[in-house]
Amino acid sequence: MMEDVFRLMEDSGHEQVIFCRHKTSGLKSIIAIHDTTMGPALGGCRMVPYETTQEALDDVLRLSKGMTYKCGLADVDFGGGKAVIIGEPETDKSPEMFRVLGRFVGGLNGRFFTGTDMGTMPEDFVHAARESESFVGLPVSHGGSGDTAIPTAFGVMQGFRATALHLWGSDSLKGRIIAIQGTGKVGGRLVSQLVEQGAQVLVADIHAERAKALQEQYTGYVQAVDVATIHQQSCDIFAPCAVGGVVNERTLPELDCRAIVGSANNQLAEDWHGDVLHQHGILYAPDYLVNAGGLIQVADELKGYRHERVMEKTQEIYDMLLKIYQLSSEKDLPTCRAADQLVLERLHQVADLKRILLSGVTGWS
Ligand SMILES: NC(=O)c1ccc[n+]([C@@H]2O[C@H](COP(=O)([O-])OP(=O)(O)OC[C@H]3O[C@@H](n4cnc5c(N)ncnc54)[C@H](O)[C@@H]3O)[C@@H](O)[C@H]2O)c1
């Protein structure tokens, strides 16, 4: 039986949940707006063949709340939101379905902006964008900003450097050993940038040929290892850049690193795994801060995209991460909890400044 939606919203602090259905296109979608204190909600739109509506609802509530935290730490003027489409991306998509989604999102009148996520592609959004201006992550030919892996990798590099400074007193990565799980768009970029900085890099990918190719390209600096053992490698920094949930009950006792800094979303299988990392003296860079480069890029599209501005903003991940590490040390708090505390402080600050009425605002409340 479906759980009471209002109770779920109350538990997670959501403002609004919208169920959208369209008979002819078969669209079934849920949009969740978590918190708009900092600005309109922003978050990706996923298409997944959820088995139940409850499963889709739980996912959209969890992900939209996560976006509030991500926007808060990245210091962009957006709040948390997310959309899910219930369906199989390979077979259920149609241009009409995305135009219908465009009309539903457009009907929110700027309260929610959305970009691509698992199961949705920039090409799908070309159809949606015909109906509303609330879509980001369009192909470059349609005014989009292009591959988000570029700022994302740049942000992770800031994470490596800030972590090195905190742990070893210098942000140089020369001679450091970094183990990268997943050598795709982000991981692959990190390898070349790390080699440039003089680091030693261990790599693993389920497509073993990708890791091997990097080993051949950077002989003497990059070594390919087995996917099953990458997290167990003795290294300075373990960088998950593939899938979520890699820090879990099974992997925790096997980790042999001083820090975890990577691009993958939801690296902690459960929040309390972050507490265990803290107890074990493994420094964890909250993933939603370190991988915020992509979010910063799509948020910038809404202002008229400027690459330099995106990279400048992404660079700030360095200082924000140092702030989290410092708070964590001072208060003996796990870094994930220190990050949450900073977001809540920011929400209070923004709510306070918004008490000042701007001229031209319609309505008096
Ligand atoms: N691209 C972005 O802008 C961006 C932004 C934020 C977060 N992320 C996250 O970062 C991660 C990497 O993103 P990407 O764009 O490089 O994706 P990608 O699909 O280009 O690369 C992922 C790589 O990981 C490999 N892989 C998958 N499962 C693996 C496993 N169990 N062990 C080892 N390798 C595995 C894949 O073969 C692939 O080469 C993802 O979790 C993504 O959600 C990416």
Image (tube, grey):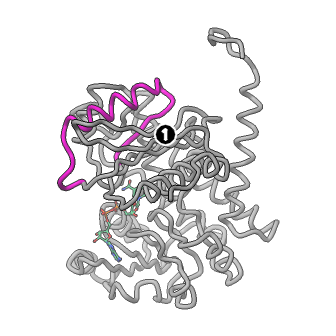
Residue drawn at 31 percent across, 61 percent down: 185
Quadrant housing residue 62 = bottom right
User: Which of 88 and 279 lies nearest the eye of the viewer?
Assistant: 88
Regarding residue 263, the answer to whether it shows in the image is: yes
Q: In which quarter of the image is the C terminus?
A: top right
Quadrant housing residue 260 = bottom right
Image position, residue 168 (x, y; %): 64, 75
**Total numbered labels:** 1
Query: From the viewer's perspective, is 152 left or right of 274?
Result: left
User: Which of 60 and 123 lies nearest the eye of the viewer?
Assistant: 60
Name the residue that disc number 1 marks. Answer: 42
In the picture shown, does residue 4 fall above or below 172? above
Image position, residue 219 (x, y; %): 27, 81
Image position, residue 287 (x, y; %): 53, 62
Query: From the viewer's perspective, is 137 left or right of 91?
Result: right
Residue drawn at 40 percent across, 70 percent down: 243
Residue 87 lies in the magenta-colored region: no
Residue drawn at 29 percent across, 38 percent down: 138
In the picture shown, does residue 67 fall above or below 196? above
Image position, residue 124 (x, y; %): 24, 41
User: Which of 10 and 233 lies nearest the eye of the viewer?
Assistant: 10
Crowding near the residue tagged with mark 1, few <14, some 14–19, many ≥20 C-alpha atoms within 10 Å: many
Regarding residue 316, the answer to whether it shows in the image is: no
Residue 101 lies in the magenta-colored region: yes
Callout 1 amino acid: Leu
Q: Ligand 1 shows up in which quadrant of the image?
A: bottom left
Q: From which residue to which does the magenta span run?
A: 89-116
Residue drawn at 44 percent across, 75 percent down: 199
